[in-house]
């Protein structure tokens, strides 16, 4: 069972800790992380969500997940990368993009923190958590921006996140 801290819109802890399912059922804000993993060819790594996933199954998206109760955001980012694709990451290599997003989707309320990781990961060596991610692939950042802008259904990303893709393209 995974527990998360409930937060306000500024990301401040309220002192309440709940099972993740209860937090979702009650649409209570809790922290999550999303990681832009980029290689030297300026491509971004996307994972194809398992078709078993309740939300956006079978679609391509960035690596990420919930911040567990008692865990820092950087610890959560490193853990999610390890869990989803099998890559051990030193937290000092995760760069906080100084952006956060408050998201009130139905049964999925999060304060999301975005991180950046530069690596030339050989994706053939990834150990995928098949319950969550069925495949990984390097995508050209401009292609992802175009897919988001044109609302292609196979890429998970909100239009208001395009500026983040443009930001990482220039890092």
Image (cartoon, rainbow, N blue to C red):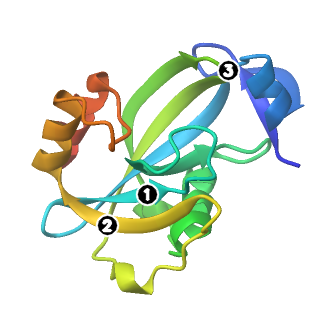
Which secondary structure, mark 2? Answer: strand
User: Measured from the top left, where is residue 80 in percent x and y?
Assistant: 59, 58
Is 168 on the left-hand or right-hand side of 93?
left
Residue at 59% x, 46% y: name it.
65
Q: Which residue is labeled 2 in the image?
A: 137
Residue sitting farthest toward the bottom: 125
Residue at 50% x, 75% y: name it.
87
Q: Foreground residue, 18 or 115?
A: 18
Residue at 74% x, 45% y: name it.
68
Is 75 on the left-hand or right-hand side of 126?
right
Asked if residue 169 shows in the view, the reply is no
Per the rendering, the mark at residue 29 is 3
Badge 2 crowding class, 10 Å Cα cut-off, few under 14, some 14 to 19, many 20 or more, is: some
User: Measured from the top left, where is residue 64 in percent x and y?
Assistant: 52, 49
Q: Foreground residue, 170 or 148?
A: 148
Vertical placement of 137 versus 61: above or below? below
C-alpha gap between disc 3 and disc 1: 25 Å
Looking at marks 1 and 2 on the same chain, the residue that comes earlier in the sequence is marked by 1
User: Measured from the top left, where is residue 30 in percent x and y?
Assistant: 68, 28
Q: Which residue is labeled 1 in the image?
A: 48
Vertical placement of 11 versus 56: above or below? above
Is 21 on the left-hand or right-hand side of 111?
right
Looking at marks 3 and 2 on the same chain, the residue that comes earlier in the sequence is marked by 3
User: Measured from the top left, where is residue 119 in percent x and y?
Assistant: 31, 71
Badge 1 crowding class, 10 Å Cα cut-off, few under 14, some 14 to 19, many 20 or more, is: many
Vertical placement of 151 versus 145: above or below? above
Is 30 on the left-hand or right-hand side of 36?
right
Q: Foreground residue, 25 or 88?
A: 25
């Amino acid at each position: 069972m995974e527990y998360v801290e409930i937060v306000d819109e500024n990301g401040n802890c309220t002192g309440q800790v709940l099972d993740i399912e209860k937090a979702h059922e009650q649409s209570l804000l809790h922290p999550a992380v999303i990681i832009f993993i980029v290689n030297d060819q300026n491509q971004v790594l996307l994972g194809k969500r398992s078709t078993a996933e309740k939300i956006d199954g079978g679609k391509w998206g960035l690596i990420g997940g919930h911040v567990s109760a008692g865990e820092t955001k950087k610890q959560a980012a490193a853990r999610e990368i390890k869990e989803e694709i099998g890559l051990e990451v030193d937290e000092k290599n995760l760069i906080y993009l100084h952006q956060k997003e408050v998201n009130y989707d139905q049964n999925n309320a999060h304060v999301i923190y975005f991180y950046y990781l530069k690596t030339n990961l050989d994706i053939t060596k990834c150990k995928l958590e098949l319950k969550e991610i069925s495949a990984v692939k390097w995508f050209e950042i401009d292609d992802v921006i175009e897919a988001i802008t044109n609302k292609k259904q196979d890429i998970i990303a909100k239009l208001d996140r395009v500026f983040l893709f443009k930001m990482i393209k220039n890092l």
